Image: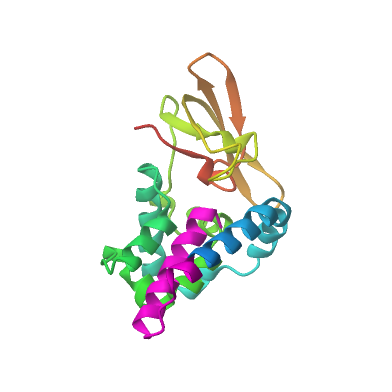
Amino acid sequence: MTPAEIEAFLKVAFVMCEVALCPLTDQQREILLQVVAQSTTSQLQSTQTTADSDSVTENPLNEMTPEQRQALLLFVKEQQQQGVSWKIRLLNDWLHSRESGAVQFIHDQYGPQWLNRIKPLHLAQYWETETPSDRLNLKIGDRIEVSNGLWEWVQESGPCQREWFPCTVVGLSQSSDGNRDYCNCIVRFDNGIEYEIQGIYQWNLYNWRWAS
């Protein structure tokens, strides 16, 4: 999780404490936010590879009905196109007691702990298998933005933050690793430099978005 997502989860927990008539003091809240943020920042890079590897075997989306998965994937797509973190959007809804529309069932049936289990690879599995007609299909000439997360380590807060760069899709091709097919995409930046993005619908799904 990013530090912003952790903070959102903690705020939901603070509200739950108040509902249970055992609210935390302002000082207690601040201490929790600082300790968790510091711990996560120091461990995030070293544990990311292991976490992603483990997440492939147990996909929380398997626990959903097909209709629920479809609603969630469409919601994620909409938030991605707007440049918004879908998890933070849900957590903010819960924090402010707002309805989450077609994905309100996530709050009612699953909750924040289940939400925290979902990783990008889990979503990528179902982009390929369960929503072919609604997948983020690109075409030659499409304008998109790509993140510097493709070529460097980025964090929501820190010396190297996420940035977005406009470019044009100039090539698309299919490849296979022997177990599954995946799509590669060549983009051309406005300065003329071209860059190949492997697995653009799979492991790099969250490193691009539609240009606004």
Query: For the point 58% across and 20% down, which residue is it?
Result: 194
Query: For the point 57% across and 17% down, which residue is it?
Result: 193
Toward the top, the furthest residue is: 192
Q: Nearer the viewer, residue 110 or 121?
A: 110
Query: For the point 51% across and 20% down, which residue is it?
Result: 189
The C terminus, quarter of image = top left
Q: How is the image coloured?
A: rainbow
Q: Give the percent coordinates (x, y) of residue 7.
A: 48, 60
Give the overall secondary structure of the magenta segment.
Answer: helix
Q: Is residue 3 visible?
A: yes
Q: Is residue 203 above or below residue 148?
A: below
Q: Give the percent coordinates (x, y) of residue 61.
A: 50, 68
The N terminus, quarter of image = bottom right
Q: Is residue 106 above or below residue 4?
A: below
Residue 141 left/right relative to 202 = left
Toward the bottom, the furthest residue is: 21
Q: Give the percent coordinates (x, y) of residue 130.
A: 46, 59
Q: Give the percent coordinates (x, y) of residue 178.
A: 72, 49
Q: Which residues are magenta?
A: 1-29
Query: For the point 55% across and 45% down, which residue is it?
Result: 157
Q: Nearer the viewer, residue 133 or 125?
A: 125
Q: Is residue 184 visible?
A: no
- State yes or no: residue 164 in magenta: no
Q: Is residue 128 above or below residue 105?
A: above
The quarter holding residue 138 reads top left
Q: Nearer the viewer, residue 105 or 66?
A: 105
